[in-house]
Amino acid sequence: MAEPSGVVVLGSTGSVGSNALDVIGRLPDRFRLIGLGACSQWQRLAEQANQFRPAAVAVYNPDAAEKLSKALNGSGSKILSGSEGMTELVTHADCQKVLAASSGTSTLAAILAAIKAGKTIALANKELLVMAGAIAMPLAKEHQATIIPVDSEHSAIFQAAQCGKRSEIRKVFITASGGPFRNGSIEQMAKANVQEALAHPTWSMGPKVTIDSATMMNKALEIIEAHWLFDLPADMIEVVIHPESIIHSMVEFRDGSVLAQMSPPDMRSPIQYALTFPERLAGCTPRLDVGHLASMSFHPPDYKRFPAIELGYQVAKTGGTSGAVLNAANEALVEAFLDKRIRLTDIPVMAKTILDHHSLISDPDLSDILTAADWAVNEVHKCIG
């Protein structure tokens, strides 16, 4: 049997990262944890480092790095910090695979460095493709790096697409649970409080992702990701509401065949597939009991109630720095909603206003992208005071 693959997990203290460590821990003959990375949760990171004993641990926040260094004194793990530390972590000579589960922009440079180093990237970081897809995908091709999606919807498309050539795909369908307001009115959404918006009917996620599900901005971002990941124009990507969350996405081929990937809603399944591809190993997730599926329903989204979806199509068509603006504006607006400074329904409206007032750079570098994101955040602050 081949030597276990060396894996680095960025964003190890979050939900996806924690699930990834569970998967890795169950497959010791396949994977060896080389490094852990997080933004600032040094205490949780120290616990993980003591459990897995990686060669190196990186934390973005310098104050957290100092505390982590004291907590892990004598552990044998090298302590790294900042963007440079993250880059050193993912380009470690013993690392073959990087599980990019971090959220936000703090690890963008590191993930791009891993791509340049030819690593296999199991990608759960939305920002890389939403903000910098035009940089990341050509770079992956140039350096023969493999990018395998971890998000359940894109993992499903990736899996189904293995059954045909790219030229044979007619359309992809990204499924959506519809979130807590799939049956609510615009008036109910406008009056919704934070607790109601965080009451997701299917998935257990962090607050930011859960609010994105409530506005369906998550589908806008997934449209942009699918555009870059699978080299698809916007008109080949369709969102469909599927409340049961059993089918995670579907691919329609030109002969009329539609292939769907089905599984219980558990992130460990797409994480394991991304890490073990092209193999399929025995999983640690519950099996789907097809005999007890009462029904599965599908219907188109209501764009009047969920105008955020249209922003995904707009950005996929526009390209350039528009993805960075939408992503950053949305993050700032979600934070404002969670702080009870704006209404839930204000998020897509204000995001569109900021997007429409942006001076587009069509062929940006990473500096242009980060500058555009900073501009968008400042515009949000101006709008809400």
Image: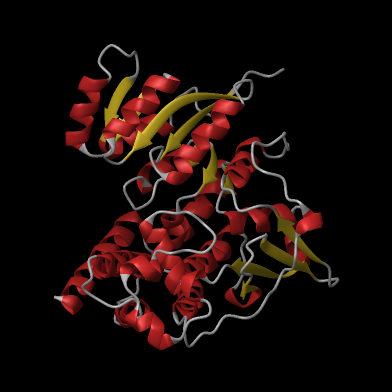
Say which of 104 and 215 sits in front. Answer: 215
Residue 68 relative to residue 349: left or right: left
Colour scheme employed for the rendering of this structure = secondary structure
The quadrant of the image that shows the C terminus is bottom left
In this view, 102 is above or below 188: above
In this view, 105 is above or below 348: above
Q: Report which quarter residue 9 is drawn in.
A: top left
Q: How many marks?
A: 0
Residue 26 on image: x %, y %: 59, 27
In this view, 131 is above or below 278: below
Q: Report which quarter residue 253 is drawn in.
A: bottom right
Say which of 305 and 376 sits in front. Answer: 305
Q: Is residue 177 visible?
A: yes
Residue 254 on image: x %, y %: 81, 71
Residue 202 on image: x %, y %: 54, 60
Please name the residue shown 83% across and 68% down the image.
257
Q: Is residue 116 visible?
A: no
Residue 128 relative to residue 170: left or right: left
The quadrant of the image that shows the N terminus is top right
Residue 4 relative to residue 309: left or right: right
Residue 30 relative to residue 258: left or right: left
Residue, far right:
255
Please name the residue shown 48% across and 52% down the image.
136
Please name the residue shown 45% across and 40% down the image.
17
Residue 160 on image: x %, y %: 74, 56
Please name the residue shown 21% across and 73% down the image.
341
Residue, far left:
385
